[in-house]
Amino acid sequence: MAPPTLFHDDPETTREAIMQATYRALCAHGYADLTIQTISDEFEKSKSLLYHHYDSKDDLLLDFLSFMLERFQADVPHREFDDPYRHLQQVFDHVVPRSLEDESADFRRAMTELRAQAAHDPAYREHFTRSDEYFQDRLADLIRAGVEQGAFRDVDPDETAAFLQTVIVGATTRRSTTDSKHVDATRAELDAYVESRLLADERR
Amino acid sequence: MAPPTLFHDDPETTREAIMQATYRALCAHGYADLTIQTISDEFEKSKSLLYHHYDSKDDLLLDFLSFMLERFQADVPHREFDDPYRHLQQVFDHVVPRSLEDESADFRRAMTELRAQAAHDPAYREHFTRSDEYFQDRLADLIRAGVEQGAFRDVDPDETAAFLQTVIVGATTRRSTTDSKHVDATRAELDAYVESRLLADERR
């Protein structure tokens, strides 16, 4: 998920400028009402450039999804987990926050629409398979480190990570598609799950 | 989620016949490629009837969603939970199954697309808020009964139900939008969660 400041700086390359315009147009219009025209309205450089680089709205959006994932991968290098329990809580604060800024809520709604394209479009499906596996593997690394350090019990890191990634996708999807006030309750029980099932006895 | 036999019988009313045609067209085409024409191709009665009753594809699909929810509510009356733990496992077998028939997978993919319309369409949002709350409340009833009977620990039924509904939505969404083989792992950890967090000590 993109933090609100993701495109804060002036873009350095044309591709980055296109991606910034796409991000803004997605937040403002969502997927359904998006056209190459609404994206080009957010784009300060030559509009013909957009039509030159991309055949269709989906072509551009798929490149946007790849860009976002690459950017996330570059920003979050594999690193040591000093305190896996605290690190996991920070992940939850970021991806299952109790409240959201408007821009972040708009962006998540658009991402939910993009993900749904994967139900019938193989190119979107390939992307979301790749990104889900990337985030799930990162969670598994974190849990494995916690088990090795004795912070977590001897759980299966891959099964635990699959479950957590499912909770994260479910929370994002429900938040984007309902007015149900479930997030506080979901988050409270998610925290209770981690305490009762993951946290080593001496850490509770 | 609709069992494959949901529309097995010959429809008794015109509305039921329209709903059966909509179900078939959704399974065959998904949301994106659906038109009133593709639905009417599955409809054996006068096609003009469809255009007479519904202004648009979304108008028809929203009626279909209401019909499915009403049907589910009628089929699953509020009843006693003889064995809440076993009942919960049956719910999981139905909504987070380890494998799916093709028709059921097609239908879930279409439902994921319909849910994503709620990101920008207030009428879809109203429906998915209502249906999420209905299913979450049913889960809370089941957990409350388990706590009262001593089968489950003294957990908060509403928080637990919110969390489980989030897992169910997440598992359905991931299955519909990725080729990731996460379901067995998600289900294994879901069962472990229920055992470690919900199940009363004397039941383990």
Image (cartoon, coloured by chain):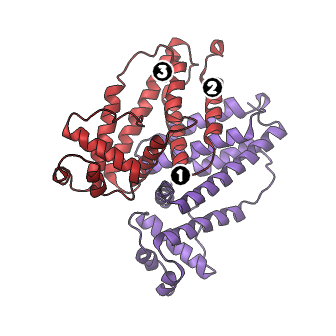
Chain colours: A purple, B red
Residue type, mark 2 in image: Arg
Kindly state the secondary structure of the residue where label 3 is placed.
helix
Residues packed near mark 3 inside 10 Å, few (<14), some (14 to 19) or many (20 plus) = many
Residue type, mark 3 in image: Arg
Kindly state the secondary structure of the residue where label 1 is placed.
helix
- Sequence-wise, which precedes: disc 1 or disc 2? 1
In this rendering, the answer to whether A113 lies above or below B175 is: below
Write the residue at 65% across / 49% down: A91
- Report how far apart the C-alphas of labels 2 and 3 lie in the structure: 14 Å
Write the residue at 62% across / 68% down: A67
In this rendering, the answer to whether A172 lies above or below B10 is: below
In this rendering, the answer to whether A187 lies above or below A27 is: above
Query: To which chain does the residue with label 2 belong?
Result: B
- Report how far apart the C-alphas of labels 1 and 2 lie in the structure: 29 Å
- Sequence-wise, which precedes: disc 2 or disc 3? 3
Q: Which residue is mark 1?
A: B177
Residue B65 can be seen, yes or no: yes
Q: Which residue is mark 3?
A: B144
Badge number at residue B197: 2
Kindly state the secondary structure of the residue where label 2 is placed.
helix
Query: To which chain does the residue with label 3 belong?
Result: B
- Where is residue A40 shown, x and y percent of the image? 45, 79
Residues packed near mark 2 inside 10 Å, few (<14), some (14 to 19) or many (20 plus) = many
Query: Horizontally, is A189 left or right of B57 in the view?
Result: right
Residues packed near mark 1 inside 10 Å, few (<14), some (14 to 19) or many (20 plus) = many
